[in-house]
């Protein structure tokens, strides 16, 4: 005597098992969703602008090696000088194959929402400038754009205009 087949494995009139078809459809759908999610994540990183919107910035702290004083200096960049800093870095495009560049300094943006945005500055003698930027070290991306010479001049001018530089010894 033959035992009856389990209800879940009864083939349909076409000879196919409906549960197997359903399982395959679920697996294919899950894989498609994962692929779309990964693609969206990669796309959003590519689409992220190199710098935050200037209107979202509450303060900028700069740190760089000043050739005139031969020392590393750190100072707040007054809002009146932000345009020059942004102009020296933009426009920029993502660089997926960055070189080993010479470090110039850093910018630390404090944003209106309380977050920080870090920018590592590099000195480039030929072609567009270079920098790495992102909300964290792990999330940074490398960019080519702007002009390193303009950036060095802008940072130097801001530093020379800052209170720390203009104070006379007592």
Image (spheres, rainbow, N blue to C red):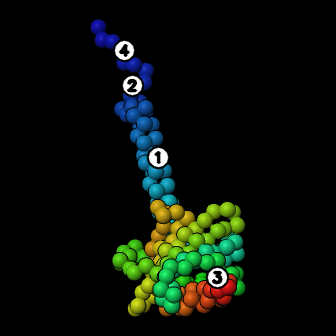
What numbered label is drawn on residue 164? 3
Which of the two discs, 2 and 4, labels the residue nearer the N terminus? 4
Residue 6, quarter of picture: top left
Which of the two discs, 4 and 3, labels the residue nearer the N terminus? 4
**Which residue, given by chain and number where applicable, does mark 2 sit on?**
9
Which of the two discs, 2 and 3, labels the residue nearer the N terminus? 2
Image height of 77 relative to 111, above or below: below
**Which residue, given by chain and number where applicable, does mark 1 sit on?**
29
- Pick the front one: 95 or 124: 124
Tag nearer the camera, 4 or 1: 1
Label 3, label 1: how far apart the Cα atoms are:
61 Å
The residue drawn where x is 45% and y is 74% is 142
Q: Position of residue 80 (x, y in %)?
A: 70, 85
**Which residue, given by chain and number where applicable, does mark 4 sit on?**
4
State the SS at label 2: helix
- Pick the front one: 96 or 125: 125
Label 4, label 1: how far apart the Cα atoms are:
33 Å
Residue at the top extreme of this rendering:
1
């Amino acid at each position: 005597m033959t035992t009856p087949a389990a209800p879940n494995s009864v083939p349909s009139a076409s000879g196919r098992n409906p549960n197997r078809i359903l399982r395959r459809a679920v697996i294919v759908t899950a894989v498609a969703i994962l692929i779309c999610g990964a693609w969206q994540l990669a796309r959003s990183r590519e689409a992220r602008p190199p710098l935050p919107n200037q209107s979202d910035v509450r303060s900028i702290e700069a740190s760089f090696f000043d050739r005139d004083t031969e020392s590393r200096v750190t100072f707040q960049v007054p809002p009146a000088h932000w345009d020059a800093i942004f102009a020296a870095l933009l426009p920029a495009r993502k660089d997926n194959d960055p070189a080993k560049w010479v470090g110039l300094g850093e910018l630390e943006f404090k944003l209106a929402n309380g977050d920080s945005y870090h920018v590592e500055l590099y000195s480039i003698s030929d072609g567009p400038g270079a920098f790495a930027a992102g909300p964290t070290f792990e999330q940074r991306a490398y960019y080519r754009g702007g002009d390193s010479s303009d950036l060095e001049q802008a940072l130097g001018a801001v530093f020379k205009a800052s209170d720390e530089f203009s104070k006379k010894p007592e």
